[in-house]
Image: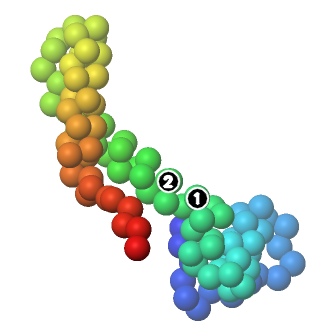
Amino acid sequence: CISLPKNAVISENSACPGVQARNRDLRIIQTEGVEAWLEQTEYHLRSLVETVMSRMKRIKERLSARKFENQVVEFAILCLILNMNVWIGMPNREAKCQ
């Protein structure tokens, strides 16, 4: 899904599945708001997946092992390091009861 422009209008009488999906998304945005559309379409998940894949491609470019088996191990280690860095950067959240 690509976010719709603010001045988008519903296309009438279209049998095209893409236009029908766009109309459905537009109706949700108009009636329930953008946040509801994002949640219902799980749009944020696509963004997260694209970010992870971009990172993986960058890591892949840096592999130094020649044999495929060693590259698999090296890739797994780099993924662990990446996950640790993400985990370290997460804020500590504590519930505050009053």
Quarter of the view holding residue 81: top left
Q: Please say if 33 is above or below 41.
A: below
Q: Residue at x 55, y 88 (%)?
A: 6
Q: Quadrant of the N terminus?
A: bottom right
Residue type at mark 1? Glu
Q: Which is closer to the viewer, label 1 or label 2?
A: 1
Residue 86 in the image: state x and y as whole percent.
25, 46
Q: Residue at x 57, y 68 (%)?
A: 38
Say whether residue 34 is left or right of residue 16.
left
Residue type at mark 2? Arg
Q: Please say if 78 is above or below 74.
A: below
Q: Report which residue position mark 2 lands on.
A: 46
Q: Residue at x 17, y 24 (%)?
A: 63
Say whether residue 30 is left or right of residue 51.
right
Q: Could you say whether the residue bearing mark 1 is in a helix, strand or loop?
A: loop
Q: Please say if 24 is above or below 30.
A: above
Q: Quadrant of the C terminus?
A: bottom left
Query: Cβ–Cβ below 8 Å for labels 1 and 2?
Result: yes
Q: Could you say whether the residue bearing mark 2 is in a helix, strand or loop?
A: helix
Q: CA distance from mark 1 to mark 2?
A: 7 Å
Is residue 66 visible in the rendered image? The answer is yes
Residue 22 in the image: state x and y as whole percent.
69, 71
Residue 80 in the image: state x and y as whole percent.
26, 29
Residue 77 in the image: state x and y as whole percent.
22, 23
Please name whichever residue, 73 or 58, is drawn nearer the observer in this view of the structure. Answer: 73
Q: Report which residue position mark 1 lands on.
A: 42
| Few, some or many residues within 10 Å of mark 1 (<14, 14–19, 20+) | few
| Residue 5 - label | none
Q: Please say if 77 is above or below 19.
A: above
Is residue 82 visible in the rendered image? The answer is no
